[in-house]
Amino acid sequence: MIDSAQKQITAFSSTLLNMDRLGAEKIVRQSQENNSPLQTVENLIVPALEKIGRDWEKGDVALAQIYMGSRICEELVDLFLPPSSPERSSQPQMAIALLDDYHALGKIIVYTSLRASGYELQDYGRVTVDELVQRICDDSIQVILISTLMLRSALQVKEVKAGLTAAGSHTKIIVGGAPFRFDPELWQEVGADAMGATAGDAVIAVTNSMKEVA
């Protein structure tokens, strides 16, 4: 038997897939009757995003649904847990990027999940190795999350690491994407500091990295 929390996650996921902004907000408000805003986004929004991500991988939902659902979640996070909220985490400068790749689904889910968990970070979009190294240095980024889909792109993380080292940067690199799930040791081979197989893993990796750069 599905417990009430799981039923709520399933219902919320359905509103996202149906692009029902008002329905999604109603469920979030109901959740907050017994939870703090941060608990709501951690226990409702993040699991729902991960659920529809898994459904997409199985071919059950469309990419457009993922994108619009993620945008709805971003709006709700800003509504119920604005950047000025005291519940937002104190953190170093962070950013997320899609490294020389065109498939943004993973980045979208991780970005939204991190913001739902109380973190703020810049979204660099799709960048090349040189562009990423330059932006990290210009913005004094301390933690960078890099998403890839193709092995060719994943291997370029090694070039990012070399560029940052040459620039005297000690930025922590967290990677994710299909190549790193298929080869559990790849993240170490390219010089990353951590790997997240899921959005939840990424949140844990960011939390751990924050302790190291604090």
Image: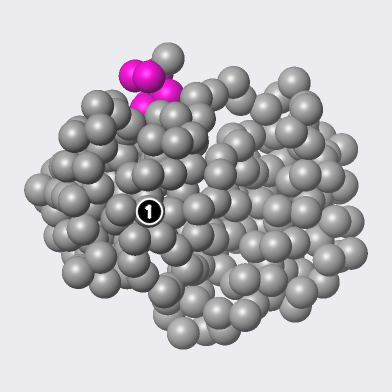
Examine the residues drawn in magenta and state their main secondary structure.
helix
Q: Residue at x 36, y 70 (%)?
A: 101
Residue 208 at x, y percent in the picture: 37, 27
Q: Amino acid at mark 1?
A: Glu
Q: Quadrant of residue 167?
A: top left
Residue 185 at x, y percent in the picture: 12, 50
Residue 95 against residue 2 in the figure, above or below: above
Residue segment shown in magenta: 207-213
Residue at mark 1: 131
**Relative to 45, is 57 on the left or the right?**
left
Q: Is residue 212 magenta?
A: yes
Residue 2 against residue 96 in the figure, above or below: below
Which residue is at the front of the view, 34 or 123? 123
**Relative to 169, is 85 on the left or the right?**
right
Residue 96 at x, y percent in the picture: 46, 48
Q: Where is the N terminus found, in terms of image quarters?
A: bottom right
**Relative to 202, is 30 on the left or the right?**
right
